[in-house]
Image (cartoon, rainbow, N blue to C red):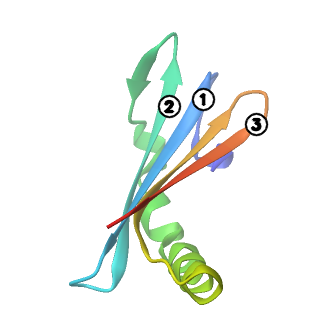
Amino acid sequence: MIDQIEGPFESIVCEYEYLERYSTVSSSISVILHGTQKYPETAAGFATDNVELCMKLRELMRFHTGGEWGSFTLSLAASGEAKTEFYYS
């Protein structure tokens, strides 16, 4: 995730959404700097790089918890602290 970003940041926000109709995941990555959210051009390949990992994560979580998230957000602060939020439909 960090290797997709050039320059300083306060946090990186990755948003993932499971598209049941297509059995795939769409994603976006943005950078927050000085309170402003931007979508960097350097992250163009990010969406396709993480689809397989997201599909595996969804399957593992369904197996262990029985729940199926519809989307989730992964935030990474410059300090290295990571947070996730899962949204179930």
Residue 16, image x and y in percent?
Answer: 42, 59
Identify the mark nearer the N-term, 1 or 3: 1
Q: Which residue is drawn at 57% across and 36% down?
A: 12
Find residue 19 and name its label. none
Residue 21, image x and y in percent?
Answer: 21, 84
The secondary element bearing badge 2 is classed as strand
Query: Left or right of 23: which side holds 40?
Result: right
Find residue 31 and name its label. 2
Name the amino acid, label 1.
Answer: Ser
Name the amino acid, label 2.
Answer: Val
Query: Left or right of 75: which side holds 28?
Result: left
Q: Which residue is drawn at 72% across and 28% down?
A: 78
Q: Nearer the viewer, residue 71 or 27?
A: 71
Q: Which residue is drawn at 41% across and 25% down?
A: 37
Q: In this view, does 82 lie above or below 33?
A: below
Residue neighbourhood size for the residue with mark 1, other residues' Cα within 10 Å, grouped as few (<14), some (14–19), many (≥20): many
Total numbered labels: 3
Query: Left or right of 5: which side holds 14?
Result: left
**Residue 7 lies in quadrant:** top right
For discs 3 and 2, the disc positioned in front in the rendered view: 3
Residue neighbourhood size for the residue with mark 2, other residues' Cα within 10 Å, grouped as few (<14), some (14–19), many (≥20): many
Which residue is denoted by mark 3 in the rendering? 81
Q: Do the residues labelled 1 and 2 touch (CB within 8 Å)?
A: yes
Q: In this view, does 78 lie above or below 18?
A: above
For discs 1 and 3, the disc positioned in front in the rendered view: 3
Which residue is denoted by mark 1 in the rendering? 11
Q: Nearer the viewer, residue 87 or 28?
A: 87
Identify the mark nearer the N-term, 3 or 2: 2
